Image (cartoon, helix red, strand yellow):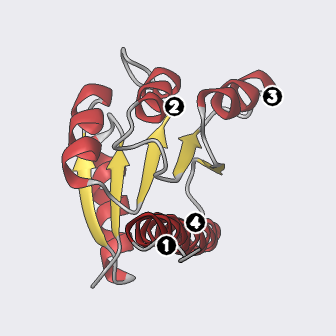
Amino acid sequence: MAETILVIDDEPSMLCFLKQRLASEGFTVSTAGSGLDGINRASDLHPNLILLDLRMPAPDGWEVCKMLRANPKTQHIPIIAVTGVLLPDHLEQAMASGADDFAFKPIDLTDLLIRVRAMLDCRGIHDAVERRTRYMEISREMSAESARAHPPAS
């Protein structure tokens, strides 16, 4: 099954460009033209990764990032912040808001694909660790339950 990427950007031409390019690489791509639409789609769709434009009308990308991180349904989805502005305070603000990585406009497709695949690999590792942790917790609970039901004979 193809990994799903949600692109949140208020520029229709950027949405179209990224959707076409990412789909041609085998990804399933969903788009949102505003921050609020993006938050709703992320919550409903639970994509494997989000590409998030920082400079949008309210809520801007920084605020959207904070909202995504505050929602238990979306808090672990990797976010690559996309910006055309190379100001250090913008990057620091995006990191503080919860972005995992950055891509700069104009988009260098090779660079973006490297970042996307790296984030998806990290997400895969995170998911595997979560699954094993849940398995260990369930195993401990079952062992404790079994010990209570069958105490050792004295």
Asked which secondary structure carries label 3, the reply is helix
Earlier in the chain: of badge 3 and badge 1, it is: 3
Q: Residue at x 49, y 49 (%)?
A: 76
What separation in Å lies between label 1 and label 2 (alpha carbons)?
48 Å
Earlier in the chain: of badge 2 and badge 4, it is: 2
Horizontal arrangement in the rendering, residue 40 relative to residue 5 (left or right): left
Residue located beneath label 3 in the image: 88
Earlier in the chain: of badge 1 and badge 2, it is: 2
Within-10-Å neighbours for mark 2: few <14, some 14–19, many 20+: many
Earlier in the chain: of badge 4 and badge 3, it is: 3
* Front position in the image: 110 or 153: 153
Disc sitting over residue 126 in the figure: 4
Asked which secondary structure carries label 2, the reply is loop
Residue 32, visible in the rendered structure? yes
Image-quadrant location for residue 33? top left
Asked which secondary structure carries label 1, the reply is helix
Residue located beneath label 1 in the image: 143
Residue located beneath label 2 in the image: 54
Please provide percent x and percent y for residue 68: 42, 34
Which mark is in front, 4 or 3?
4
What separation in Å lies between label 3 and label 2 (alpha carbons)?
13 Å
Earlier in the chain: of badge 3 and badge 2, it is: 2
Q: Quadrant of the C terminus?
A: bottom right
